[in-house]
Image (cartoon, grey):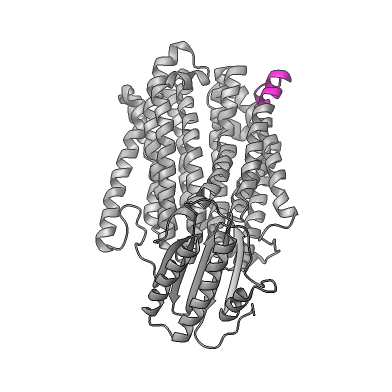
């Protein structure tokens, strides 16, 4: 059978839960505070929490520049089996994020008024904004720690632990919000303290992965020149994401000031509700993008274009399904959303009107953002950078024009800007494909692998295994390989495939394993992935003669259990066998 998306989809869903909950903790904390604060204090307090979004977004921007860029490089290095590079990137990221977080904490302790004055231009909101802001900025190391550990621990093969940590973070956050505001009467400062408590708890839970020695990463004290080189590579990779985040920070700052000065604090409240809706959408797009880029980066490292394409398809399928449901709720029940933020009756009609329009606009925003991530992975940097700038900055002049000259269209500003950006992307990708027909439309992933590749799935039955092995044998004979090399590959493949079939204990009838063989100039690489019980084929026990033979025929066999899957990579080279696994 042709390669199916079973294992790719399963890994995607496993990553997805961790990614969404990380996004929930990192980006939805502000909306949780907004909802609870608006009910327990007043709607001005909720507007004040929204004014701190540029600060929160700015911290996330720095993580994207360094941490996210490094995590993509780590995933690629894992796909290539480069452990030294993995450790250097991991160590550099820890050092740089720690230095940044501690610096910002010092600013929050000694000179908080500088930043409060910059983000709050409305005197009626200044007191609330100042109280909410100070614990947030002092807790910057914890915010960055949540981002860092969430991403790197998931790549390290423990996305479920990340999910548990982030779920605990958000539940504790909500409970502490109510306790500190309602029962301890701490006011708006209690909501920001509860955010910090939740993040600290999540970090403690995820740290168990490293304390217990389960991590593949090793922290190293590396030279300054190595730190500089790793930092440069990470920043280059993370630049489009950071630029998009910087532009979003500018967007939040400029649009809130345009609305506040041009339409007043009532319209600013309505806009704050819409920004909180954007935060919900960001939860979905961040989860989809982080999952896609982690898995796709590994597949790019392996040269697996087909797997990359399946991962992107999974991301788009999840995103469109989720956003369709979200938009349906916003379109049919806008009053419920408005009441969630304790919207005053006199603002209800306009708030519902804006919610419907923004719901559709942010859907388009998410699609464009997912495309940006994919273009960066494929090294279409020009396209990625264009989207990262245009997504946010294009809205500002449109909104300014509408506020000053066409107030009836002010809530349409985002949708108008995003439609223009999407049209430009369609035109540019059509031009690129005109010069390279091998690329898929719009997403631009190559249709074929760089090297001759056998890429098939087989079911967990002897019958399916034998059919796949027969097809493999025919394919190998057509590749102009040395007969002895073909024999070694066939023997190894047959033994490993039979072992998977015998030990899978998989009851799902649709379950299947993946077999991928790439014929490269330096030799042949065979990759076998299955989701059966963990089983290491290297160094088999006494009596497993088939696996002993397989280990002897290969030049090298590497095994790891990651993402709920057995992953075995076998290398063959022409000539004498010198296998370290013999």
Q: Position of residue 185 (x, y in %)?
A: 71, 19
Q: Is residue 483 above or below residue 255?
A: below
Q: Which residues are magenta?
A: 177-192
Q: Residue furthest front?
A: 463
Residue 239 visible, this orientation: no
Instruction: Report which quarter residue 563 is drawn in.
Output: bottom right
Residue at 59% of width from left, 56% of height from top? 505
- From the viewer's side, name the closer residue of 157 and 496: 496
Image quarter of the N terminus: bottom left
Q: Is residue 320 above or below residue 157?
A: above
Residue 203 visible, this orientation: yes
- Dominant secondary structure (helix, strand or loop) of the stretch shown in magenta: helix
Q: Residue furthest bottom?
A: 576
Residue at 43% of width from left, 58% of height from top? 308
Q: Is residue 32 above or below residue 162?
A: above
Residue at 33% of width from left, 22% of height from top? 407
- State yes or no: residue 189 in magenta: yes
């Amino acid at each position: 059978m042709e390669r199916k998306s079973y294992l790719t989809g399963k890994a995607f869903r496993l990553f997805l839960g961790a990614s969404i909950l990380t996004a929930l903790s990192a980006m939805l904390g502000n909306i949780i505070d907004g909802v609870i604060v608006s009910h327990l204090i007043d709607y001005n307090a909720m507007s004040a929490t929204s004014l701190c979004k540029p600060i929160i977004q700015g911290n996330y921007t720095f993580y994207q520049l360094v941490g996210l860029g490094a995590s993509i490089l780590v995933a690629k290095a894992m796909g290539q089996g480069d452990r030294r590079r993995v450790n250097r990137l991991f160590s550099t990221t820890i050092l740089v994020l720690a230095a940044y977080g501690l610096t910002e904490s010092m600013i929050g302790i000694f000179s908080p008024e500088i930043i409060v004055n910059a983000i709050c231009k409305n005197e009626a909101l200044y007191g609330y904004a100042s109280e909410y802001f100070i614990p947030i900025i002092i807790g910057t190391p914890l915010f960055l720690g949540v981002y860092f550990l969430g991403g790197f621990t998931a790549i390290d093969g423990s996305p479920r632990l990340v999910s548990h940590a982030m779920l605990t973070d958000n539940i504790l956050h909500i409970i502490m919000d109510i306790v500190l505001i309602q029962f301890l009467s701490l006011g708006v400062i209690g909501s920001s303290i509860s955010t910090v408590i939740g993040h600290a708890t999540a970090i403690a839970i995820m740290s168990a992965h490293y304390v217990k020695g389960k991590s593949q990463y090793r922290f190293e004290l590396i030279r300054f020149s190595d730190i500089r080189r790793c930092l440069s590579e990470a920043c280059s990779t993370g630049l489009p994401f950071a630029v998009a985040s910087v532009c979003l920070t500018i967007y939040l700052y400029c649009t809130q000031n345009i609305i506040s000065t041009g339409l007043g604090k009532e319209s600013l409240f309505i806009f704050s509700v819409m920004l909180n809706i954007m935060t919900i959408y960001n939860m979905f797009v961040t989860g989809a993008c982080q999952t896609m880029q982690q898995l796709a980066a590994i597949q790019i490292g392996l040269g697996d274009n087909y797997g990359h394409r399946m991962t992107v398809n999974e991301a788009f399928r999840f995103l469109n399904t989720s956003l369709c449901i979200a938009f349906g709720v916003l379109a049919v029940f806008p009053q419920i959303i408005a009441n969630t933020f304790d919207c005053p009756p006199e603002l209800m009609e306009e708030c519902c009107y804006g919610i419907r329009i923004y719901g559709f606009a942010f859907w388009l925003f998410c699609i464009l953002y997912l495309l940006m991530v994919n273009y960066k992975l494929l090294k279409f940097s020009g396209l990625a950078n264009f989207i990262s700038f245009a997504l946010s900055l294009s809205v500002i002049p449109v909104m300014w024009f509408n506020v000053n000259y066409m107030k009836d269209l002010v809530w349409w500003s985002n949708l108008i800007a995003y439609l223009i950006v999407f049209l430009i992307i369609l035109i540019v990708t059509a031009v690129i494909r005109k010069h390279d027909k091998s690329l898929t439309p719009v997403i631009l992933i190559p249709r074929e692998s760089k090297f001759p590749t056998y890429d098939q799935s087989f079911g967990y039955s002897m019958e399916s295994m034998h059919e796949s092995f027969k097809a493999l044998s025919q394919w190998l004979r057509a590749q102009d390989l040395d007969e002895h090399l073909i024999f070694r590959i066939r023997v190894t493949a047959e033994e490993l495939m039979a072992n998977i079939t015998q030990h899978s204990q998989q009851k799902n009838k649709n379950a299947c394993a993946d077999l991928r063989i790439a014929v490269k100039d330096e030799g042949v690489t065979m990759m076998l992935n299955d989701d059966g019980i963990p089983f290491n084929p290297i160094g088999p026990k006494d009596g497993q003669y088939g696996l002993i033979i397989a280990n002897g025929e290969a030049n090298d066999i590497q095994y790891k259990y990651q993402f709920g899957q057995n992953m075995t990579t076998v290398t063959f080279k022409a000539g004498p066998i010198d296998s370290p696994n013999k």
